[in-house]
Amino acid sequence: MNIDGVSKEFNVTKDTLRYWERIGLLPEIKRNESGYRDFTERDMNWVYYIQVLRNAGMSIESLVEFVKLYREGGATMDARKKLLIDQRDDLQEQVEKIQKTIKYLQFKIDHFEDHTMNYEKEKLAVDEDTLKD
């Protein structure tokens, strides 16, 4: 598949795909007889994998390290696994913070009228005192 097709399939810009290839996140993409990139299924699997890890918040630097370790072979399995575990733990922490925020917002929504009514009553009392002066 050409770069335009890959770009559309994965909703990632062509510039991003070129960048990922240039910094070594993607393997060197073979070129067709016209010199255009010709992505194989394996190449597209790498695009998907990188996209998933980026969506998980993994930095470009960590991704470069992960791919470098992958290319070094089986002896680096523990280090690669640790990178994934660390990213999962960071993501889990973010999820917990978001869930806490959602619960707080839901509380505020559920009690919105109570808070608004108290504020309005306080405001009316202040306004009435101001009018007496």
Image (cartoon, rainbow, N blue to C red):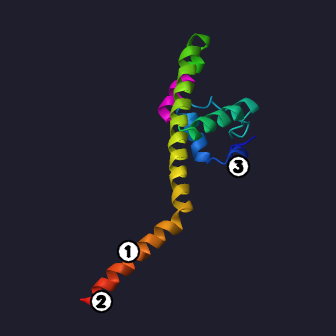
Dot 2: few (<14), some (14–19), or many (≥20) neighbours within 10 Å? few
Mark 1 or mark 2, which has the lower sequence index?
A: 1
Residue under label 3: 8
Cβ atoms under marks 2 and 3 closer than 8 Å: no
Q: Residue at x 74, y 36 (%)?
A: 33
Dot 3: few (<14), some (14–19), or many (≥20) neighbours within 10 Å? few
Which of discs 1 and 3 lies nearer the camera? The answer is: 1
Q: Secondary structure at mark 2?
A: helix
Q: Quadrant of the N terminus?
A: top right
Q: Residue at x 51, y 36 (%)?
A: 93
Query: For this rendering, which residue is in front, 85 or 9?
Result: 85
Relative image position of residue 55 (x, y in whole percent): 59, 41
Query: For this rendering, which residue is in front, 4 or 87?
Result: 87
- Occupied quadrant, residue 39: top right
- Which residue type does callout 2 highlight? Leu
Q: Is residue 58 visible?
A: no
Q: Residue at x 37, y 77 (%)?
A: 123
The outermost residue toward the left is 133
The residue segment tinted magenta is 59-68
Q: Quadrant of the C terminus?
A: bottom left
Q: Secondary structure at mark 1?
A: helix
- Which residue type does callout 1 highlight? Glu
Distance of label 2 from label 3 (alpha carbons): 65 Å
Residue under label 2: 131
Query: For this rendering, which residue is in front, 119 or 106?
Result: 119
- Occupied quadrant, residue 22: top right
Which of discs 2 and 3 lies nearer the camera? The answer is: 2
